[in-house]
Image: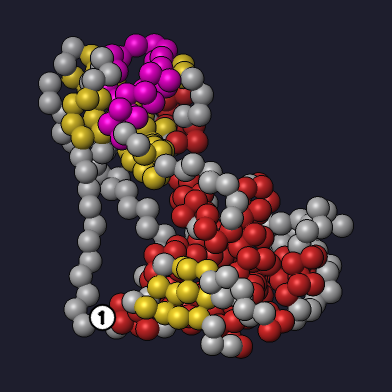
Amino acid sequence: MTTTFSLESLTRLSEQTAYEAWLLEDVYRIHDNLVISPERDRLLLLPNGSRLKHYVLGVATCHLGDWRPGFIEACSPLVFVTAFKLLDMVLEWILLENGKTATHRFQQKISALQDSTLEFPPPIDKHLWLRERLLALYEQLDPLRGTVIHSRHFQTTNGNLTVASSRGGVVGTPVSMSNQEIRTLAVLLTRLRRYVLRDWKHDAYREKLQALACDELVSLHSLPSLCQLQPVFTTVRAYLDEREPLIVDLEDLRVTVQVNYPHQDVVFDLRLVTVLDGEMVDALWLPWNQLQVSSLSISSTDRVAIRVALPAEFDV
C-alpha cells in the first residue's frame, strides 16, 4: 500500500494531540526558536578570508510570578506521562495510516511498529536514526508510564523523577530521569509533532537539534549516541573581489567559519558582497541548502535570481 498522510489525516492528528501539545509547549515555552536577524550578519569575512567582525546576538525573557517552575518541580510525573501519551498518539496514528488495527495494548503496538514495511511521514521517513530512537523510547518508557499511572513505585524531587517498572507485579530497577531530560523529551516530541503536521519548517539546522535531543536522552532509549555537537545557525557575509564569473571556495569558507564556532555544528546562510576599487558592487544571498558543494561559479545571469540590497554599513 502507499500511505499519503493526507491533509485530512494530518488535521485529525492535530486535533487528537492538541491538548498534550498545548500543555507541554506552554509549560516549557516551546516554540520554533530560530532567531535570525535579516538586517545583521553574524560573521563578516574580508576578501582574504580572515575574520573582520563577529556578532553574538542574544534573546532573553523574564517572567515575574511565573507559575511554571513550581508546576514543573511538583508535577514531573504528569509532564512525563503527557509526553509519553503524545508519542503514543503519534505512533498509533502512523499505525492506523498503515492499515493496522486499532488497539489499546501497548505491547501489540510495539510489536506492530517493528514491521519493516511501515511507511512513516516526513521527516521521520528520511531519518532511520530518528525512527529507531523514537521506537526505542516508546518501548523503554512504556512500563515506566504504567508505573506512574497505576502504582506508586516512583519518587519525585525538585522535578527529577525516579520510576521502577512494576509490570506483572514485579518491581524492576529504578530509572532516573532528570528535570532536564523530561524537558528534552517534551521538546523532542512537540517539535516532532509540529514537523509532521508541517506547522514548523524542518531543515538541516532543526534536524541537528532533534539529533542533539536524542543524544541527551541516551540513558532513556539506550541506543548509541549520534555524537551531535550543539547546532548553531548563523549568517555569514563574505567580501570578494568583483569578477566574472564569481568563484566561491566553499570548502575554505566552511573552514574559516568553523574556526569561529569551535565545538559547535554550524549551519549558515551566506551573503556575498563583491568589491571593486574600495566600493561595493553587488550583494548576493545564498541559503544554506545551496552551499552543500565544494565551490560555486556564479555568472552575471545567475546573479539576477539571488541579488539582494547592498548592506548599509561598509568599512573600506
Q: Secondary structure at mark 1?
A: loop
**Which residue is at 50% across, 81% downward?**
154
Residue 300 in view here: no
Image x and y of residue 292, in percent: 50, 29
Image x and y of residue 34, in percent: 37, 53
Q: Quadrant of the C terminus?
A: top left
Identity of the amino acid at label 1? Answer: Asp
**Which residue is at 87% across, 57% downward?**
1
**Which residue is at 22% across, 52% downward?**
58
Question: Which of 238 and 103 lies nearest the eye of the viewer?
Answer: 103
315 with respect to 294 (left or right): left
- Compared to residue 283, the image places residue 211 above or below, namely below
Image x and y of residue 55, in percent: 20, 40
Image x and y of residue 153, in percent: 54, 83
- Compared to residue 232, the image places residue 17 above or below, namely below
Q: Residues within 10 Å of mark 1 (few under 14, many from 20)?
A: few
Per the image, the residue denoted by label 1 is 66
Q: Quadrant of residue 13?
A: bottom right
Question: Which of 87 and 5 lies nearest the eye of the viewer?
Answer: 87
Give the magenta-colored segment's residue range: 238-261
